[in-house]
Structures are given as structure tokens and as C-alpha cells.
């Protein structure tokens, strides 16, 4: 190799690496050359047959009574400092390896990070990734884990049985502030720009999840962002986290992406189920309360059944019915044109931020009341 070449090789490598790094952060959901329709061209797995998210169609979900509940350990209050970053697509909290989830088959997964998907370009645009009977929910929480048989997330992320994600939906009605989210939400202001990191002191992921952790949908899928690796065992909780409208608004309007635009609608459209079967460990029957029981005020065990199915509309805003495909894209297009007008501007109406202090309540502790009010 001549000396000129020798000098050029490192330069060329740097250029290529730089290009890759930029390429890695350049994918988008709806804008530019690498929007989600084009992900498969650069990340072939994104065009696979076992992709996520999906629509969870309850009449097709197979109830498997033998499927045990998840066992979560180390999710409760933890001392220490936990980095929280704006990665240009979402906010991500690094989790300690002491947090573990044991699945029904005994596989132990170690927590790696937690992040969120949301909507927000208008007060009616929701942003969960999975839909339930075509209904998109307000926010979706993902707690990403890797299989403990691998020594690190980096090793597991390419292994066929490498990952598991515990997912949960957020609903917003007229709930008061969920104080378990207060610290997280107040820290968003520190990471407005991509690449910025802040630190959460102390963490209680258990409190940030729904009250009922036992009932879930389960299926085999993929990462919902490039490289869309098809090695994720999904556990989607049936119960909801409840946040106030102000809290949801802050998540939807606090962070900017690499193009200096507010991060909104950071969700992938639902993917074909293909040959896969979705299982649940709770029945889909008995979702309707007998009117007689409601009238007499005899709300007993039926309450929890009803709640699990979440047959009631998830928010007071009108539900957004969506199926995979054109309808969804059309709705995102509409969103796009609206989004500029809403950047950093509270939408008119019910999402106007209100004083946080006036309605502070510890939501989980009051969940029983919240459940009854849901009727
Ligand atoms: Zn995610």
C-alpha cells in the first residue's frame, strides 16, 4: 500500500463511520427519505414477517389459562442515579440490571432501558404503537429487557431469543396528576435537545406501571424501530397507567428532534400479524357488567373483569379508530400539516396546562376509586 493510500484509509474509514452514525439516527416516522415506508430498504428486517407493533384483536386473541403471570423483581424504589436521555426519537431512561422479569416459561430477562411512544400533534392524536381492537391509546410505555442467558444487551440484541419488552398503555380522562410521574416529567425540560442527558435520583418503575401486572397479551415480534430485529418477546399489559392531561401534554411538547422539531407521533404503524397467534392469560369474556348489578350498586368481582378488558373508551376524547395501511398514513399526513402550528404551543381546549399543585393525588394508591369512576 502506498503512503498516500495509507493516509487515505483512516480518513475514508472515518468518513464511512460518520456516515453510518448519521444514517443510524436519520430514520424518521413520516418525513424525509428514510420514513417508515423506506426502513426495509436500509434495515431489511423491517420488512420481515414477524414485525411489531400489531393490532391486538381481542376476538382473535387466544386465552391460555396455563400462561402464568409475570414475576417482576427489583422494580420497586431504588436508590441511585439513573440517566435519562433525549435520543432524538424519544426519552429513554437507563435501568439498573437489578430489575428482572421472569416470564411464564421461566426465562429471566434483565431490564435495560425504558422509553415512551406518544402522539400529540393535535389534542386528538394519540401515539401508542400497539392498538387494541383498532383503538390507538394515548401513550405506550416500553420497558426493554434482554435474556439473562446473554452477558449483555449488546450480545443479546442480535440473538434469536435475545429480547423481551414489557409494554403498557397510558389513558387520560380527567385524572389528577399522577405523582409517580412528576419527577420524570419535570426532568424533560433538561433534555429539550437531542443528545442531552439528565439524571433521575431514585426510581420506582413499579409505580410507573399499571396497578395490575398480572394480565397481559403475549406474542413474538420485533423492535419497533430500526433495525426492527425479530427477536422480541412482547408482553403487553391489559391494565392502564393513568396520567393527567397536563402530564400528557408535557411529554408531547417538551422534546425536540435532530431537525429542531417537536418530537410527536413517534410511533410505527401496526404491522401484519401474518401466521402469528397472540395469547392472553385472561379471558375475553364477561366484559359487560350486568345492568342489574350496576343499578343495585353491587359491583363486585365483575369490576375487575370489566376493567381488564378495558371495554370502556380509554379517554373522554373521541377514540381514533385506525387499521394498518392507508387510513393510518392519511391520518399521519394530516397530523404532519398540523404539527407546525402546534410546536411549543398548547393546543386550544382541554389540553391547556393547568396548575399542577391544585389536584395532586397519589394515583396508584387511589386506583380502586379510579377504577370505579371509570364506569
Ligand atoms: Zn418502543
Image (cartoon, grey):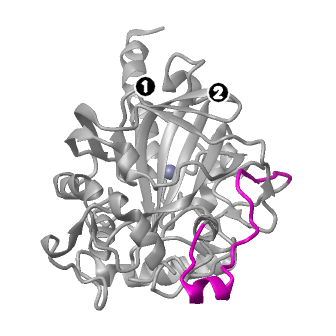
- Look at the numbered disc 2 and give the secondary structure of its residue: loop
Residue 163 shown left or right of residue 63 in the figure: left
Mark 1 surroundings within 10 Å by alpha-carbon count, few (fewer than 14), some (14 through 19), many (20 or more): few
- Residue 57 in view (yes/no): yes
Label 1 CB sits under 8 Å from any ligand 1 atom:
no
Q: State which quadrant residue 228 falls in.
A: top right
Magenta residue span? 275-300
Compare marks 1 and 2 and give the one earlier in the sequence: 1
Residue lying at 23% horizontally and 38% vertically, measured from the top left? 202
Q: Which residue is mark 2?
A: 107
Q: Position of residue 161 (x, y in %)?
A: 68, 29
Which label sits in the foreground, 1 or 2? Answer: 2
Asked which secondary structure carries label 1, the reply is helix
In the rendered structure, the answer to whether residue 297 lies left or right of residue 52 reads left
State yes or no: residue 285 in magenta. Answer: yes
**Residue drawn at the location 58% of the way across and 65% of the way down:** 304
Please give the name of the residue rendered at 70% of the width and 63% of the height, measured from the top-left corner: 56
Where is residue 326 drawn, in percent x and y?
Answer: 68, 78
Mark 1 = which residue?
Answer: 13
Q: Residues within 10 Å of mark 2 (few under 14, many from 20)?
A: few
Label the magenta part by its dominant secondary structure: loop
Distance Cα–Cα, label 1 vs label 2: 40 Å
Residue 49 spot, x, y in % from top left: 78, 50
Residue 24 left/right relative to 275: left
Give the vertical position of 52 relative to 108 (above or below).
below
The x and y percentages for residue 300 are 58, 70
In the image, is 115 to the left or to the right of 327? left
Amino acid at each position: 500500500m502506498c503512503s498516500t493510500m495509507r493516509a487515505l484509509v483512516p480518513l475514508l474509514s472515518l468518513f464511512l463511520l460518520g456516515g453510518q452514525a448519521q444514517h443510524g439516527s436519520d430514520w424518521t416516522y413520516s418525513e424525509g427519505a428514510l420514513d417508515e415506508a423506506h426502513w426495509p430498504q436500509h434495515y431489511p428486517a423491517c420488512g420481515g414477517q414477524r414485525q411489531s407493533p400489531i393490532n391486538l384483536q381481542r376476538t382473535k386473541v387466544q386465552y391460555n389459562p396455563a400462561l402464568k403471570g409475570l414475576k417482576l423483581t427489583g422494580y420497586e424504589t431504588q436508590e441511585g442515579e439513573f440517566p435519562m436521555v433525549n435520543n432524538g426519537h424519544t426519552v429513554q431512561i437507563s435501568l439498573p440490571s437489578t430489575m428482572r422479569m421472569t416470564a411464564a416459561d421461566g426465562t429471566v430477562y434483565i431490564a435495560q432501558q425504558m422509553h415512551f411512544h406518544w402522539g400529540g400533534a393535535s389534542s386528538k392524536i394519540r401515539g401508542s404503537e400497539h392498538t387494541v381492537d383498532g383503538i390507538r391509546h394515548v401513550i405506550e410505555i416500553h420497558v426493554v429487557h434482554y435474556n439473562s442467558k446473554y452477558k449483555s444487551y449488546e450480545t443479546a440484541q442480535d440473538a434469536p431469543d435475545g429480547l423481551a419488552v414489557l409494554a403498557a398503555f397510558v389513558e387520560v380522562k380527567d385524572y389528577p396528576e399522577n405523582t409517580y410521574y412528576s419527577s420524570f416529567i419535570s426532568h424533560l425540560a433538561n433534555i429539550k435537545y437531542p443528545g442531552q442527558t439528565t439524571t433521575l435520583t431514585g426510581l420506582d418503575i413499579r409505580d410507573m406501571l399499571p396497578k395490575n401486572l398480572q394480565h397481559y397479551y403475549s406474542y413474538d415480534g420485533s423492535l419497533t424501530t430500526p433495525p426492527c430485529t425479530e427477536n422480541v418477546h412482547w408482553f403487553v399489559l391489559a391494565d392502564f397507567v393513568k396520567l393527567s392531561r397536563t402530564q400528557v401534554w408535557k411529554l408531547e411538547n417538551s422534546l425536540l428532534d435532530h431537525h429542531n422539531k417537536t418530537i410527536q407521533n413517534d410511533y410505527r404503524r401496526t404491522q401484519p400479524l401474518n401466521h402469528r397467534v397472540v395469547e392472553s392469560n385472561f379471558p375475553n369474556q364477561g366484559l359487560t357488567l350486568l345492568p342489574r348489578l350496576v343499578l343495585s350498586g353491587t359491583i363486585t368481582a365483575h369490576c375487575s373483569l370489566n376493567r381488564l378488558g378495558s371495554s370502556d373508551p380509554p379517554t373522554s376524547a373521541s377514540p381514533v379508530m385506525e387499521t394498518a395501511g392507508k387510513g393510518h398514513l392519511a391520518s399521519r399526513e394530516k397530523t404532519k400539516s398540523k404539527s407546525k402550528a402546534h410546536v411549543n404551543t398548547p393546543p386550544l381546549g382541554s389540553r391547556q396546562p393547568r396548575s399542577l399543585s391544585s389536584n395532586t393525588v397519589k394515583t396508584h394508591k387511589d386506583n380502586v376509586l379510579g377504577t370505579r369512576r371509570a364506569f
